[in-house]
Image (tube, rainbow, N blue to C red):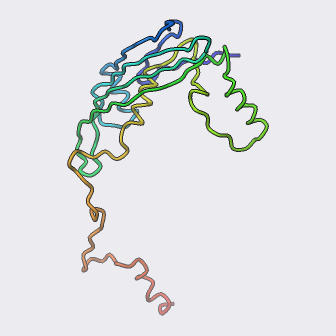
């Protein structure tokens, strides 16, 4: 079986799983200025000033699964959906992920699910990430990509600058009574039958 290559992302911080200790492995990772620019482009935000994460990695004795947890902190420039002004936002959220070397072992839950897929050929329940971990590729996991994925979920879909609210009626179109625009879209059809 051909080995899968681990591709470098906008912000990659590769961790070699052989560096895991018997106890928790603690790391702090931080994106460079250039990596912040690349992540901002990917996440479609005006700018990212900084991304930093404090992470703890561990593997249960006798288990092939590596658990990553921690917190990320990011300073992000967003655009207000009401005023279109740019404003800074500090985002801080938990990070969690599970990884396993699929070439060494497959979890019992994952193997059972694959068997059920073949048997039923129908809808299959989505598994918890801890039961279906991401693959460790060539003995390495990308912690930068894991944090980037969590950051993308933390960015609000409709950012609002503090104190700015969408007022009901802001979206109503004001039509001048003397305007050639008609109030009723079917008004143009009122004489249709007579003109035929």
**Occupied quadrant, residue 101:** top right
Residue under the image location 43 percent in, 17 percent down: 56
Residue 9 pos. (x, y %): 45, 23
Residue under the image location 26 percent in, 60 percent down: 167
Position of the N terminus, as image quadrant, is top right
Quick one: which residue is furthest to the left in this view?
Answer: 163
Image: 120 above or below 8: below
**Occupied quadrant, residue 13:** top left
Residue 76 pos. (x, y %): 29, 33
Residue under the image location 67 percent in, 21 percent down: 106
Residue under the image location 45 percent in, 83 percent down: 189
Quick one: 67 or 35, which is closer to the camera? 67
Quick one: 194 or 162, which is closer to the camera? 162
**Left or right relative to 44: residue 134:** right
**Occupied quadrant, residue 102:** top right
Residue 47 pos. (x, y %): 29, 32
Image: 41 above or below 156: above
Image: 62 above or below 124: above
Residue 117 pos. (x, y %): 73, 36
**Left or right relative to 12: residue 104:** right
């Amino acid at each position: 079986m051909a080995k899968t290559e681990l591709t470098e992302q906008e912000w990659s911080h590769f961790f070699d799983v052989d560096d895991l200790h018997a106890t928790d492995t603690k790391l702090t990772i931080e994106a460079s200025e250039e990596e912040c620019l690349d992540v901002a482009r990917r996440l479609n935000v005006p700018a990212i000033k900084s991304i930093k994460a404090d992470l703890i990695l561990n593997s249960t004795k006798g288990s092939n699964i590596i658990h990553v947890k921690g917190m990320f902190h990011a300073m992000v420039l967003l655009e207000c959906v009401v005023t279109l002004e740019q404003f800074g936002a500090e985002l801080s959220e938990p990070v969690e992920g599970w990884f396993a070397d699929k070439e060494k072992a497959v979890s019992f839950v994952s193997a059972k699910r694959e068997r059920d897929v073949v048997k039923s050929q129908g809808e299959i329940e989505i598994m918890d990430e801890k039961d279906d971990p991401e693959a460790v590729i060539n003995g390495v996991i990308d912690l930068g990509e894991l944090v980037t994925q969590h950051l993308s979920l933390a960015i609000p879909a409709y950012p609002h600058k503090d104190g700015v609210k969408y007022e009901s009626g802001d979206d109503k179109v004001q039509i001048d009574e003397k305007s050639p625009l008609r109030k009723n879209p079917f008004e143009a059809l009122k004489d249709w039958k007579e003109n035929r």
